[in-house]
Amino acid sequence: MTFVRGALAGMAALLLGGAAQAAPPFPDAQATDPVALGWMVGSPPPAERTIRFEDGGFLKFPQLRWTFSHWRELFPTAVVWRGPGPVSELPRAPREDLDAVSFTPLGGGAAMTWGQSLAANYTDGILVMHRGKVVYERYFGALKPEGTHIAHSVTKSFAGTIAAMLVAEGKLDPDALVTRYIPELAGSAFGDATVRQVLDMTTGLEYSEVYTDPKSPAWDFVRAVGLLPRPPGYSGPTASYDYLKTLKKAGEHGQAFSYKSVNTEVVGWLVQRAGGKPLAQQLSERFWTPLGMEQDAYLQVDSVGSGYAAGGLNLSLRDLARFCEMMRQNGRFNGRQVVPAAVVAEISGGAKREDFAKAGYATLPGWSYHDQWWVSHNDHGAYMARGVNGQACYVDPKAEMAIVRFASHPQSSNVYLDPLSLPAYHAIAQHLMRTP
């Protein structure tokens, strides 16, 4: 089997958030609507409208606009059961005025409205909650209210929240070495790393996610996890945890933030060891059942059934809203305390901004990264779960607002979405505060 290297680089970057490059022009959201283009329609669909895993077509653009809403049809997954209880209510108070809310993009330029920004960022679904009520909900393209969408690295924040809960329960010591819980990593880069350093991604690793480099170690990671096809003769690791054992240290741990998805795979392993159950089961018991989710979710797994903590969660938009609104309400939702308020406070308090600044995120000055969440430290106390291609959960405590979004932007890095998304979220927050 042969692959075009450029397509493989695109696939890996889409999944893991490769380095930003100059953005080429792409057809707009309307021109790439997956329903209008007729992807995967027919029994079977015609060859020119068929999307497959094995040839890499599933993550080319515009095919990915279909793929993101049908992820579990292409990958093995474990069920995240919603439980036997009733669905929790999401009260509605629709606001027709939000589409006209105007903002100026980061870096300047012409003003844009909220409604215009949704198409510009290839939004598949967006939901805004204010004071516990759904004030805005829209779906586009292949995503339906009853459907699920790949959350990509928003998954990290779910795993990080469970880890923070295990810390609060005394089952996971943030100051302990990772090897207390995972002795199998003693000979790896994580052998002398602490749980906290992994949670906050301040490890020193001989590892990069630069997919323009054909020798990047990240290629073996994505192949081990099963995120892209393995070429003929491939003899590397075929499971996530086997790959983690091969990583080498570079520099010292605890010196600077460096976003590397392999850290979250260690977090997922820690959660399973300290929590004593598979990640999908813990997601079900800690979130899906008590939150009264509408739909089962699905967690991508590797060849031995380990959950892909770095980016494998597929869930509905409304259920992501339930999770993020729970965080906004200091861990309380559906009549119960789902996450201890102290855990939410710990997460939203963030980490050392000077460590984060060393990573050079031009669109995120003054931010930090803590427990697998992105923390703004702005005057609203906003913090986020973020995934490539536009997946987001934005929590604004001061505005009593939570925004969740699924998207299928042609560019993976959020550096292309932040100039519109971040000021748009803040503009909606300010508007809701002015006109409650």
Image: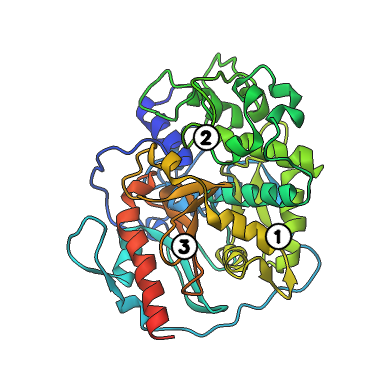
- Colour style of the rendered protein structure: rainbow
The crowd level at tag 3 (other Cα within 10 Å; few <14, some 14-19, many 20+) is: many
> Is disc 3 placed on a helix, strand or loop?
loop
**What is the quadrant of residue 269 in the picture?**
top right
* Residue 347 place in picture, x, y as percent: 58, 54
Q: Nearer the viewer, residue 257 or 391?
A: 257
- Mark sitting on residue 287: 1
**What is the quadrant of residue 273 in the picture?**
top right
Q: What residue is at 69 percent from the left and 23 percent from the top? A: 185
**What is the quadrant of residue 76 in the picture?**
top right
Q: Amino acid at mark 3?
A: Ala
Return the disc, 3 or 2, that comes first in the chain's sequence.
Answer: 2
- Mark sitting on residue 202: 2
Q: Amino acid at mark 2?
A: Thr
Return the disc, 3 or 1, that comes first in the chain's sequence.
Answer: 1
Q: Quadrant of the C terminus?
A: bottom left
CB contact under 8 Å: marks 3 and 2: no
Q: What residue is at 41 percent from the left and 65 percent from the top? A: 379
Residue position marked by numbered label 3 in the rendering: 382
Q: Amino acid at mark 1?
A: Phe
Q: Is residue 344 left or right of residue 351?
A: right
* Residue 276 place in picture, x, y as percent: 82, 42
Position of 191 relative to 299 (above/below): above
* Residue 232 place in picture, x, y as percent: 53, 17
Position of 160 relative to 245 (above/below): below
Q: What residue is at 42 percent from the left and 49 percent from the top? A: 389
* Residue 384 place in picture, x, y as percent: 49, 56
